Structure formats: structure tokens, C-alpha cells
Amino acid sequence: MLGSGDHPKEECGVLGVYAPDREAARLAFFGLFALQHRGQESAGIAVANGHRVRMHKDMGLVSHVFNEDVLRVMDGDMAIGHTRYSTTGASVLRNAQPVFCQSLVGDIAVAHNGNLINTRELRAELEDEGEVFDSSSDSEIIARLVVRNIQHGPEEAVKTAMRRLRGAYSCTVLTPKTLIGFRDPHGIRPLVVGRLEHGGAVIASETCAFGPLDAQFERELAPGEMVIVGHDGIRYAQGAPSPRPAMCLFEFIYFARPDSQMYGRLLYSVRERMGENLASEYPIDADIVVPVPDSGIPAALGYSRRSGIPYREGMTKSRYIHRTFIQPDQPMRELGVRMKLTPLVEHIQGKRIILVDDSIVRATTTTQIVKLMFEAGAKEVHVRITAPPITHPCFYGIDMASRGELAAARMTVKEIERHLGATSLGYLSIDGAVQATGRDRDHFCLACFNGDYPIAVPSDVEARRSEKRQDVGQLAAVASAQRSLFDE
Ligand code: SF4
């Protein structure tokens, strides 16, 4: 995963742990490590000991936010955790998660991955009824809806909240004695359940969180379903009816870790198959297949296997620079790509290369990589992309761009090819991407590829999203200017 400013970004990872007679916060800490790719701006853990809920959260990576001193005092056998990437003006501590709410009948904490689309009406309604919000995050709306009904018990409180929420949400909720995970009626963002070896349960955005905790995968939570974990065991219940599943196809293409499983398949294998399908759809005579590290690797292997053209690494990626978006001006962005990727000239020189990557959003990064390959002596650069052209923005928890910024919304494939300076360009079709998952189209959200939004998006939402993106860009520019190029 290049993780650049030109790649879509997952907004959050969520976790829940119930570990009888063990320190749940410590397990949550290790689980969050595995979910770090889903958000790097803030991290938090809330822990419950049967009487109360306590929380620690801060800006930064999981390893920066938590240390032995913090974890030592977080006693309790239930915990939830969160890693966050912010998109909304709000890379600030008050928007970090979990969200904590106090009530007369007990405290709750909520961790949320996704995006609500009826935020404005819910917030106005709750404010009219006297709620005072601490943050601008839609996750606080979920927390406040739950806490308003907590006197009926956590399960009923969550069900009542689910009836009001519209949009994408995979959440974990913690009360002093109960841990709940729940997923929106379309199951847009993932949520899985595992069992700990010596009793207890783990709820996580992805199965990759189970490995460090020695947890066994039990199953994916179904759309609209909830899992209720208490000292008396684990139960499942339908929190809201599901009209149809619409899981995010992008999780399969790029966001989720390749060692995670979704819809019962290892994502590394799914991505290899996408590469095979790409080779069938866009064959070309060339000397080597080169991945853009790291996310392009499985698809490049698949392309190579299907085409019979040798796989060869064409560049190395620095492990220590996480961003290319350092300064908002173009020369600095180019420097960012060059700091991150170094061409292996001996592999590339004089070769016709097939360059495999996962997605093109604005086309800025891919343009730089193509340039880098030609400068290193490539004779031809044929770009092959496993995500179909992204023509519409996401409103369900992925930060990609507003519609006007999307390359495929502004240009034809031929125009993008020229813009990239590539010898040729081929995108995997929607059917080719879906086929690789082993499910059919009816199981997916494909909105950013075809504009067919499974949950209707109110007309004012895109306008507000664009405004927020501009605010974020300005904030990011200020924050970046204050940071050394080599900080990360
Ligand atoms: S619009 Fe695209 S990125 Fe967003 S949930 Fe749907 S498939 Fe995923």
C-alpha cells in the first residue's frame, strides 16, 4: 500500500475484546496494532471492569498513544478500541474515538467505522431535545442515541439507535458489563467475530486482528446483525432488517489487509485473481510485470501467472515514510513519491513493463510513478489497475475525493492514459473485480464505480462533503508545514 494522498483512505478500525480474568486493554492494544492500516491519526481504548468504563485516547499511532504506564492502570476484562483516520476538519483529539458518554444508569463508550448520511437531521433533532455535543463526529451521534435508551438495557438501546441511523456503520459499544458489536443493515463496512482460546471473544473490523490475540475466527457479522457479549456468554441478534448486503468492494481491492478474510476468502488470493482477470481483459506483449509496492504485489503476481510474463520487482519502497502529502504544492508531492519509491534501474532499463497498481483516484501519484519508470530507462510502461474507474465519491466512510477531483469522472480512459504519460492503460471491469471475490454483484456496494448508491445520499451531503474536504486540506497544509519532511 503506497498510502499516498492519491489513494483512497479507510477511515477507521474498530475492535472489541472480552477476556475473562485477563487484561482486556492489553489485548485490545495488540489488536489495534493489526488494525493500524485503517487509521493512523488517533487511537483509543475504553475498558470496563464491571462497575465503570474508563478510557484513554490521543492523537498518533497506537504505539505512540499507549505505553506500559497507561495500560497498567486500565484494569478490566472488557475493552473496545479504535484507530482513526479523520476526513472532516477534525484531526483533533475531541474527535478521536472511542466516544465516551455518561448517563445516570452507567457509562458507555462507542467505536465506529463508517459514515452516517443522516447526521444533520439526527444532530438537529438531538440538540432540539437538549443534547450538547462535544465533537463534530457522527460517531458521537451514535453514542448519544444509544445512551438515551440505555435504561432499557444495552441490547435494546443499540436496536433503538439502529432504527434511526442511516448510512454505513460497524461499531463496538462498551458498557460496564456488556460488549456489543453491530453492523448496518447493508453491512457496508466489515465486522467479524472471533473466539479467544481460553474463553472470551474478539470483535474486529478485520480477521487480521485475531492473529496477535490467538483468537479463532468464528464468523462475519451479517448485515443488520449484532453480537452481544457478556459474562453469561455470546449471543447474536438481528438489530435491524437487512434489505440486501452491500459490502464495500474496495475493501477487497485495497483497504483491508491482504491477510484478512472477507466473504470467506483470503484477500491476498482475491487480489491475485483480480490480477489474473486483468491479464485476461487487458493482455499486452511486455518483458516484465512490476507491482507498485505493496498493494499491487498480489495482483501483479496474478497478472504474471495468467499472462506468462515474468514477475519482477521494479522499485523498492521506503518503510519509514508514510506520507507523500507533505506540502500541498506539486514539487513537494513529487519529492514525496521519490522519497518513498526508488526504482531498481537494473530491472527496468530497456524493458517493456506492465505496472500493476490497485487504484487511481486523482492520478497524481500514478503519473509520478510512470515518470519514475521512464526515467529509470523503461521502454514502455503499460499501466494496469485492479479497481475499475472511480467515477463517483464515497459517502460511506472512505475518503477518496469529491467528484470533480476524480480522474475517471473528468476524463475518458484514453485521456487518463495520456495524462499519466503511460504507453497503455487498462482498468479491471466491475465484473472482473466482483468475480474474483467469489460472490455476485448483489453482495456489494459498487457506488464509486457506477453511481448506484445502496443507500440514497441526500443531495446536500455531497456539497457539504466538498466543503469539509477543503477545510481539511487547509488544516492538513498547516499541520504539514509545521512538521519536518523527515518526521515520519
Ligand atoms: S462507494 Fe466505493 S468505497 Fe464507498 S463503500 Fe461503496 S464501494 Fe466502498
Image (cartoon, rainbow, N blue to C red):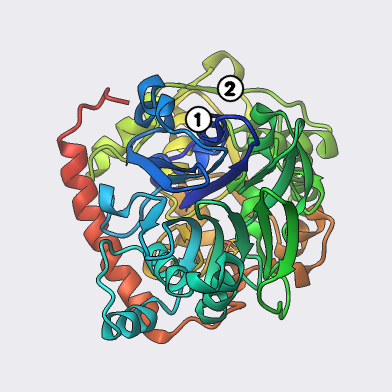
| Mark 2 closeness class: few <14, some 14–19, many ≥20 residues within 10 Å | many
In the structure shown, which secondary structural element does the residue marked by tag 2 occupy? Answer: helix
Q: Residue drawn 36% across and 52% down?
A: 86
> Mark 2 and mark 1 in contact (Cβ < 8 Å)?
yes
Residue 60 pos. (x, y %): 34, 35
Residue at (35%, 36%) from the top-left corner?
324
Neighbour class for label 1 at 10 Å: few (<14), some, many (≥20)? many
Q: Which mark is residue 266?
A: none
x, y percentage for residue 199? 74, 36
Quarter of the rendering occupied by the C terminus: top left
Quadrant housing residue 448: bottom right
| Label located before the other in sequence (1 or 2) | 2
Q: Residue at x 22, y 44 (%)?
A: 329
Q: Secondary structure at mark 1?
A: helix
Q: Quadrant of ligand 1?
A: bottom right
Q: Residue at x 68, y 23 (%)?
A: 312
Question: Spatial distance from mark 1 to mark 2, Cα to Cα?
Answer: 7 Å
Q: Residue 179 or 338: which is nearer the viewer?
A: 179
x, y percent for residue 154: 56, 65
Query: Residue flagged by tag 1: what amino acid is it?
Result: Met
- The residue positioned farthest toward the top in the image shown: 346
Residue identifier under label 2: 348
Q: Amino acid at mark 2?
A: Ile
Q: Is residue 1 visible?
A: no
Q: Nearer the viewer, residue 267 or 238?
A: 238
The residue that disc 1 covers is 373
In the image, residue 179 above or below residue 214: below
Q: Is residue 366 visible?
A: yes
Q: Compared with residue 352, is residue 350 higher up or lower down, i.e. above or below? A: above
Q: Is 246 in front, or is 113? A: 113
With 335 as the anchor, is 115 left or right in this view?
Answer: right
- Residue behind label 2 places its C-beta within 8 angstroms of ligand 1: no
